[in-house]
Image (cartoon, rainbow, N blue to C red):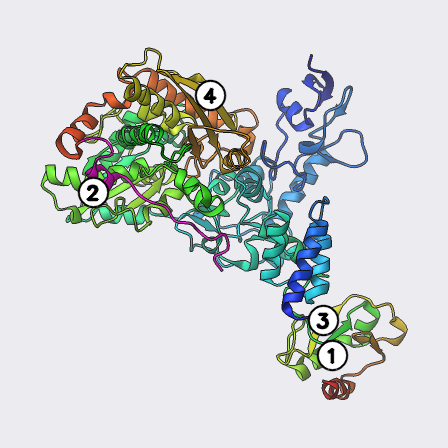
């Protein structure tokens, strides 16, 4: 894991590389999201100054696209499918159970920084409905009762 | 030769230069196409779809961004288009706080006007969820009420493109999109320059000035206070519009009568202080030129410009004239010279400024502007607020006689009057600087090169043996361009006038609001400036140093321009400000 200074150096390098190309804001934000795992205020200020655009513009783009997050995400990103098939098979109950078990509202990260809970559109695994993913791992045919066990497994991994 | 094209709009043939939009061409053909997000020279993004027309293409097209082409046949008002626009308005209303009766923009709201013109019958045709926003009234100048916002982005374009400030923008996506500062910070926590140009761009009541009328009524009604009022030059050039006078009508005499009837104890004139400013600033300029001071010297009358310079170009702070702005000078002189003359304790005198400006509300709160130990100016109201107070007081403005300002601090020359238009301070300064440097008087006092609405104006003026190179910029976006050219060494000047608002004070953020439809064919910058230049031309005295009451003030109290006493009362200093305060 690079330390913070290295991350900021990396960001400056990205800005230097891209600043003269038109529409540099999107690729710079994408790289920044990759480097920091999110684009918090100080990172957005550096981007605004580096590219000569206003902070309002950077923030506007960062909040428009779902791929950018303003706060750091958890180590495990849980995405519960809210597509039609999963929804009729009870994914809302799964989501509610997760929210209760992790004590975190949808879209937010748990206090221990381990889990970020998201509701997503169709994941394309309708045959396994209701479905959720934890990072790259897929869990299908879920019931709310399955949730505590799954979460416990990740808590043990830390 | 300009290339002309001919097109037909609603059966009317019209010839226009190539590059004209269908919206502009229609106006020329005598056809009004309704608009909402469009603002001439500022915002043409085809977003609101109100101006859709049938130009024979696929679907309806937005006229504000549709170039007119030769032989084009356009229909702007078919039953289909009318139904389409009506539905659009109903959709806008579905997420609009419809408290029109108490809205500051009622009767002057573009959305309200369109709903009436286009015959919208049901404001709740698409009733459903509405976003609820907290009102941001932390700024001393500007209130933002997103519950009224229709997301047209005219304010965003004005703040960013015209003023080069950009402290608001569209945030989030879809139904929850809103116009905000980053991280939902309040405007007051951003590097907003308080110019209020966003207010004059807003079609609805989502942006308006922080109200000071109640405080002013309280002062007037306080028997223990001696309340002095002063209106800025540009107020008289626009106040009449609020009472049905055509744009460009000067209403100086009626304005004075109204102020007196409202109950102010003295009606002094900021124009007097404009003449006083010229005496101080002209002397400062001559000193800088002859004694090797920092050049170019830049004017300091506009508080929006000052805050812009302090925040975005702090390296130019030494270039700013140390002169306070005219109304602050008048406040300081009122609480010292006038207080002594009238035998009133300065603590019992309250000064109210009527300004075309929302940034003056911020300026009045600057702690360093308190020469007598009390604030130089206690309250600031805009031209719009004054109009409101006159109506509230039941004064029939149109029936008022013309009255004169009170003596002592009420006389002004033509030079003081033109302060309200871009280039006016420069022209006034040149008229007096000529006398200061050469000892002679100018025969022709008109400096046409610094008049007009071009963003940056330049001139080289012969003053005796000296060639004085001057520049004028209005709108902080134009000021940025000018300062960047000076920084790069591309340009060199001796004296620069900057006004924070495009057009100068006549089109300041506190002036009566002109609709986007009116601005399509009429430029308030030009029309209102005419009122001031007309008043100047009609004055017997047109040079600040000829002002008898100003001369008397120096003879009896201040001594000479830039004297120790003048410095104490009439000059100030500036601070570097952070772009990101949080």
Is label 1 in a helix, a strand or a loop?
helix
Mark 3: few, some, or many residues within 10 Å (few <14, many ≥20)?
Answer: many
In the current view of this chain or complex, which residue is farthest to the right?
A: A127
Contact between labelled residues 2 and 4, with CB atoms less than 8 Å apart = no
Q: Which residue is mark 3?
A: A118
Q: Is residue B127 visible?
A: no
Residue B459, numbered circle: 4
Question: Same chain for marks 4 and 3?
Answer: no
**Dot placed on the residue nearer the N-terminal end, 4 or 2:** 2
Q: In front: mark 1 or mark 2?
A: 2
Q: Which residues are magenta?
A: B560-582
Mark 4: few, some, or many residues within 10 Å (few <14, many ≥20)?
Answer: some
Q: Which residue is mark 2?
A: B227
Name the chain letter of the residue that bears numbered label 1. A
Q: Main secondary structure of the magenta part?
A: loop
Q: Position of residue B425 (x, y in %)?
A: 37, 27
Q: Is B17 situated left or right of B145 in this image?
A: right
Name the chain letter of the residue that bears numbered label 3. A
Contact between labelled residues 3 and 4, with CB atoms less than 8 Å apart = no
Q: Which residue is mark 1?
A: A93
């Amino acid at each position: 894991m690079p330390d913070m200074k290295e991350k900021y150096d990396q960001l400056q390098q990205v800005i230097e590389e891209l600043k003269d190309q038109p529409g540099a804001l999107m690729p710079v934000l994408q790289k920044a999201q990759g480097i920091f795992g999110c684009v918090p205020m100080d990172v957005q200020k550096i981007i605004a100054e580096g590219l000569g655009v206003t902070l309002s513009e950077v923030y506007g783009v960062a909040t428009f696209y779902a791929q950018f997050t303003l706060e750091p995400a958890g180590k495990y990103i849980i995405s519960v499918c809210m597509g039609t098939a999963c929804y009729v098979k009870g994914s809302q109950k799964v989501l509610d159970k997760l929210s209760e078990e992790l004590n975190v509202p949808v879209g937010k990260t748990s206090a221990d920084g381990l889990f970020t809970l998201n509701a997503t559109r169709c994941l394309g695994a309708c045959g396994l409905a209701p479905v959720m993913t934890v990072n790259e791992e897929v869990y299908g045919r879920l019931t709310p009762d399955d949730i505590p066990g799954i979460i416990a497994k990740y808590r043990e991994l830390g | 030769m300009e290339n002309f094209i001919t097109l037909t709009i609603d059966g009317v043939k019209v010839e226009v230069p190539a590059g004209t939009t269908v919206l502009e061409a229609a106006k020329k053909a005598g056809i009004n196409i309704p608009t909402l997000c469009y603002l001439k020279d500022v915002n043409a993004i085809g977003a609101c779809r109100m101006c859709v027309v049938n130009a024979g293409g696929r679907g309806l097209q937005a006229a504000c961004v549709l170039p007119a082409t030769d032989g084009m046949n356009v229909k702007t008002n078919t039953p289909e288009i009318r139904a389409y626009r009506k539905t659009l308005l109903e959709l806008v209303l579905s997420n609009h706080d419809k408290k029109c009766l108490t809205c500051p923009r009622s009767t002057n709201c573009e959305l309200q006007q369109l709903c009436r013109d286009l015959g919208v019958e049901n404001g709740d045709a698409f009733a459903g969820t509405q976003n609820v926003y907290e009102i941001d009234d932390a700024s001393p100048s500007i209130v933002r009420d997103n519950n009224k916002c229709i997301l047209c982005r005219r304010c965003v374009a004005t703040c960013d493109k015209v003023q080069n400030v950009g402290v608001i923008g569209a945030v989030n996506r879809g139904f929850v999109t809103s116009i905000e500062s980053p991280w939902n910070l309040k405007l007051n926590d951003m590097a907003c320059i308080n110019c209020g140009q966003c207010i004059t761009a807003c079609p609805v009541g989502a942006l308006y000035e922080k109200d000071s009328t109640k405080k002013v009524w309280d002062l007037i009604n306080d028997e223990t206070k001696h309340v002095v009022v002063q209106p800025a030059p540009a107020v008289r050039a626009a106040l009449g519009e609020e009472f049905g006078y055509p744009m460009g009508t000067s209403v100086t005499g009626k304005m004075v009568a109204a102020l007196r009837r409202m109950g102010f104890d003295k009606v002094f004139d900021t124009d007097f202080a404009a003449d006083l400013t010229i005496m101080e600033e002209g002397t400062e300029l001559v000193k800088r030129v002859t004694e090797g001071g920092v050049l170019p010297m830049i004017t300091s009358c506009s508080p929006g410009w000052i805050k812009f310079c302090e925040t975005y170009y702090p390296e130019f702070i030494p270039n700013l004239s140390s002169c306070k702005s005219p109304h602050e000078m008048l406040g300081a002189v009122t609480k010292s010279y006038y207080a002594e003359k009238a035998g009133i304790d300065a603590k019992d005198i309250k000064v109210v400024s009527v300004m075309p400006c929302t940034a003056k509300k911020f300026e009045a709160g600057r702690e360093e502007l308190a020469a007598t130990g009390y604030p130089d100016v206690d309250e600031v109201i805009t031209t719009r607020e004054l109009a409101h107070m006159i109506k509230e007081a039941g004064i029939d403005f149109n029936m008022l006689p013309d009255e004169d300002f009170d003596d002592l601090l009420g006389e002004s020359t033509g030079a003081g009057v033109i302060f309200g238009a871009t280039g006016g301070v420069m022209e006034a300064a040149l008229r007096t600087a000529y006398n200061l440097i050469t000892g002679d008087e100018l025969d022709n006092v008109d400096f046409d090169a610094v008049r007009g609405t071009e963003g940056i104006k330049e001139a080289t003026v012969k003053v005796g043996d000296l060639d004085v190179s001057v520049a004028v910029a209005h709108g902080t976006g134009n000021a940025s361009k000018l300062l960047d050219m000076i920084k790069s060494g591309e340009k060199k000047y001796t004296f620069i006038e900057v006004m924070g608002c495009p057009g100068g004070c006549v089109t300041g953020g506190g002036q009566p609001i002109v609709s986007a439809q009116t601005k399509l064919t009429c430029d308030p910058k030009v029309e209102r400036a005419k009122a001031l230049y007309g008043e100047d031309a009609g004055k017997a005295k047109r040079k600040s140093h000829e002002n008898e009451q100003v001369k008397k003030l120096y003879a009896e109290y201040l001594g000479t321009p830039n004297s120790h006493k003048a410095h104490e009362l009439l000059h100030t200093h500036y601070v570097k400000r952070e772009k990101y305060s949080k």
